[in-house]
Image: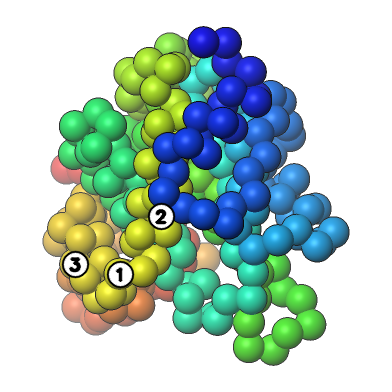
Amino acid sequence: MRHTTENQIREIREQTKEENLTLLYYDTIDSTNTRLKEMAEEGAADRTIVIAETQTKGRGRFDRNFYSPAQSGIYLSILLRNRSLLEASHYTIQAAIAVTRMIKKMADIETQIKWVNDVYIQGKKLCGILVETLWGLKEHSCDVIIGIGVNLNVESFPDELKDTAASLHLDQDQKPTCIACLIDEFFQVMQEDFKQVMEEYRAKSCILHKEITFLWKGKKMKGLVQDINEEGNLVVLIDGKTEILQSGEVTMHIE
Ligand code: BTN
């Protein structure tokens, strides 16, 4: 079957269990998060999902690029409107779990999660998640964009990524099924008790009980990860004192 955008949308729609989704599929776009942000400002509905075959300016955290070649990955963003701040604080963790479950179902591979938003396989990054909150005039609720990029069948990475990035080896024909599965898993995880989801997240963590390096108050520090708490924050032992990390980036400290 030809991989036209219409076919992709139709196949995704046929396979997802979710209803009331607005799905848009672009061949080429700068960034699905950026496009969805513009659409949100123009009044896009809750549960609008933008998917792209390739992104010319795929974005990661800390203003990094997200390598998004054509016919190689899932690049999608989900808009959720009028959510509580507590709900919004769970999305990165829920999205990471949804990705690990999708990969288990589609490729029968166990993956790990590197706090807070990366999915890893054998020490290399397979997926990145970029959650962006849109602050409007509302005091107790917000709109959120959950952007997910998964390397499904990237043949080769540029030099700067080849030691740190990995890809699955799924057939391009499986992409609509992977996308439908990812969408279903994400909305399923959102329905589940967050405590249980955190249990699954901890079990998949590749940094729990490990020595890590991270930026702390502008300084590069080392510490031992004791726990990932109920809010999804990292509990780290630094120089004999327990500290809570709410965001940031860690690297595993491999001796
Ligand atoms: C990261 O690695 O820091 C997060 C990467 C997130 C990439 C996804 S791909 C779909 C969506 N659109 C973007 O521009 N970024 C996210």
What x and y, as percent, mark residue 33?
Answer: 66, 48
Marks 3 & 1, CB-CB < 8 Å contact: no
Q: Which residue is mark 1?
A: 192
Q: Amino acid at mark 2?
A: Phe
Q: Which mark is residue 22?
A: none
Q: Is residue 73 above or below residue 104?
A: above
What x and y, as percent, mark residue 178?
Answer: 39, 33
Q: Amino acid at mark 1?
A: Glu
Q: Which callout, 3 or 1, points at the residue further toward the start of the chain?
A: 1
Task: Name the mark nearer the viewer: 3 or 2.
Answer: 2
Rate crowding at label 2 as few (under 14), some (14 to 19) or many (20 or more) other CA atoms within 10 Å: many
User: What's the image's color scheme?
Assistant: rainbow
Q: Which callout, 2 or 1, points at the residue further toward the start of the chain?
A: 2
Question: Is 105 or 126 nearer to us in this picture?
Answer: 105
Would residue 58 appear left or right of 19 to someone viewing this image? right
Would residue 35 appear left or right of 233 to someone viewing this image? right
> Which residue is painted at 38% across and 16% down in the image?
171
- Tell me the distance, in whole angstroms, between the alpha carbons under discs 3 and 1: 12 Å
Q: Is residue 212 above or below residue 1?
A: below
> Which residue is painted at 29% across and 37% down in the image?
103
> Which residue is painted at 58% across and 57% down in the image?
20
* Disc 3 element: helix
Would residue 91 appear left or right of 195 to someone viewing this image? right
What x and y, as percent, mark residue 117?
Answer: 41, 53
Q: Which residue is mark 3?
A: 199
Q: Which residue is mark 2?
A: 186
Rate crowding at label 3 as few (under 14), some (14 to 19) or many (20 or more) other CA atoms within 10 Å: some
